[in-house]
Image (tube, rainbow, N blue to C red):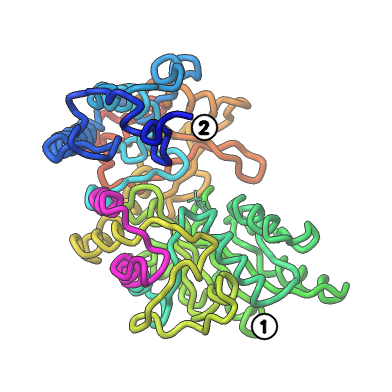
Amino acid sequence: MPPADDRPTQYGPSRGAVELTTVALLNESSPDPLGLDVETMRALAHHVADLVVDHLAGLRDLPALRTGTPADLEMALGGSLPRSPSDPRAAIADLTEVALVNLQHGGHPRYFARVPGPASFTGVLGDWLATGFNAMAASWAGGSGPAAVELIALDWLATFLGLPPGTTGVMCSGGSLANLTALGAVRERVGPGVCYLTDQTHSSVARALRIIGYPADHIRVVATDARFRMSLDALDAALGEDRASGRRPTVVIATAGTTNTAAVDPLPELADRCDAQGLWLHVDGAYGAPGAATTGGRTLLAGLDRADTLVVDPHKWLFQPYDLGCVLTRHPGLLEAAYSMSPEYLADVTARSGEIDFRNRTPELSRRARGVKLWLTFRVHGADRIRDAIEAGIRTAELAESIIRRDPDWEIVTPAQLGVVTFAHRGAEPGEHSSGADEVTASGIAALTTTTLAGRSVLRLCTINPLTTADDLVATLTALGLSLPDRRS
Ligand SMILES: *Cc1c(COP(=O)(O)O)cnc(C)c1O
């Protein structure tokens, strides 16, 4: 047996056994094997900040999306497990020059694919702060500051969207987990029964229902109308059939801004039915809900305030870096009833005055302080500026629509709504749209994707980035093959 001080310790080999590796950057006076001295920390932090700001400043001139091959990425970044320290600047350079260029730059002004992520720099700063302070938002006792910030940010968000006073909720990683978290709590509240959604509902919702344990015959896909909204007639028929055959309708799952076309299900009519028939109204506003803060969007999204549970993704249209999704509900105690980890835990005290343990509102226990970035963004920019940034995205899709209409060989399939427009080349060959989108994306000029609507392939632009200009649209559409008059007059 080796002498006592040669034995490995819980934190690594004991000092007596191993000669300390001397790298200039390591603080040899520190007992922490991972320690850096303060000046090195400061220099590296400034270096990282410079890299990020340089990246953002030059983003417009980079490809909107780049995809590496597994072999190239493995070659540049892999190899055997590093055994000893190395120069952090060289490692950081590998990240910024290889790993972090091979991605979708969701904040690029010509990134129109799926849903862009035009994160504000203020949001980035908030995340940096929360990470740097390693802020935990699991319990009041363990992080009363971050918990208060999360509560306030949720409250500001609810006010921003015009939701009723007393609305509260929880933050999670995104729309998928927010839907799962909300619907898990709803299932606990309403018991087993049938849920109603449409063929335009985001696929994360049906997945969430399956995870929660809904059998396939309790997930009812209701037909949509010509504008891809839940058909009320089809819903009424489905409710009637289910009741007649002894099934119990429980939850209507509406979408406020579908991912395909930003269609909004008829929320007031659905809310009326839910009220009259004792059904729960869950609204997936992961993409579109922020539109409710704008003048035009408020009308389109009327009824959003009647949702029993609502999902919003601030990492989409509220300018937050990944990740941030929110569950909002006007039913205090709903989430605690499902997720409280101490059975004797009492119903929530009112949100603004109480001490909230967020671990009791979500399946997460240890959780990052996601509220910090949203709080900072609301605080620094204010609701009016954020509303203007959302409006800009709505107007950009309208502008795209008007540009596309100038070429008679192309047609609008669904008009611009909440920042999404879909269109098609008249008489397109099968596969033409997707190969066109792929070519433009591979060229680096822009990134866009297709989708399928009622069996028809269409091109789609999601234009929520306030940086996007008319020239960006013209460049993208020209690259796709539209023939457009030289420039706007
Ligand atoms: C994006 C989206 C989701 C999923 O959100 P993630 O943040 O990607 O998990 C769910 N519903 C709708 C309507 C969406 O647009």
Which kind of residue does numbered mark 1 sit on? Gly
Region rendered in magenta: 124-153
Q: Judge from the rendering whether residue 44 lies leftward or rightward of residue 435; answer left or right.
A: left
Is residue 375 visible from the viewing direction of this image?
A: yes
For label 2, the SS is strand
- Image coords of residue 275 (percent x, y): 61, 83
Magenta stretch contains residue 145: yes
List the residue tagged with mark 2.
425
Identify the residue at image location x=71%, y=58%: 221
Q: Predominant secondary structure in magenta?
A: helix
- The number of discs equals 2
- Image height of 97 relative to 477, above or below: above
Which kind of residue does numbered mark 2 sit on? His
Q: Nearer the viewer, residue 383 or 94?
A: 94
List the residue tagged with mark 1.
278
Is residue 160 visible from the viewing direction of this image?
A: no
The image quarter in which residue 67 lies: top left
- Image coords of residue 46 (percent x, y): 15, 37
Q: CB of residue at label 1: within 8 Å of ligand 1?
A: no
Identify the residue at image location x=25%, y=63%: 378
Q: Judge from the rendering whether residue 200 lies leftward or rightward of residue 481; answer left or right.
A: right
Q: CA distance from mark 1 to mark 2?
A: 46 Å
For label 1, the SS is loop
Identify the residue at image location x=43%, y=57%: 367
The image quarter in which residue 161 lies: bottom left
Magenta stretch contains residue 158: no
- Image height of 424 relative to 177, above or below: above
Which tag is nearer the camera, tag 1 or tag 2?
1
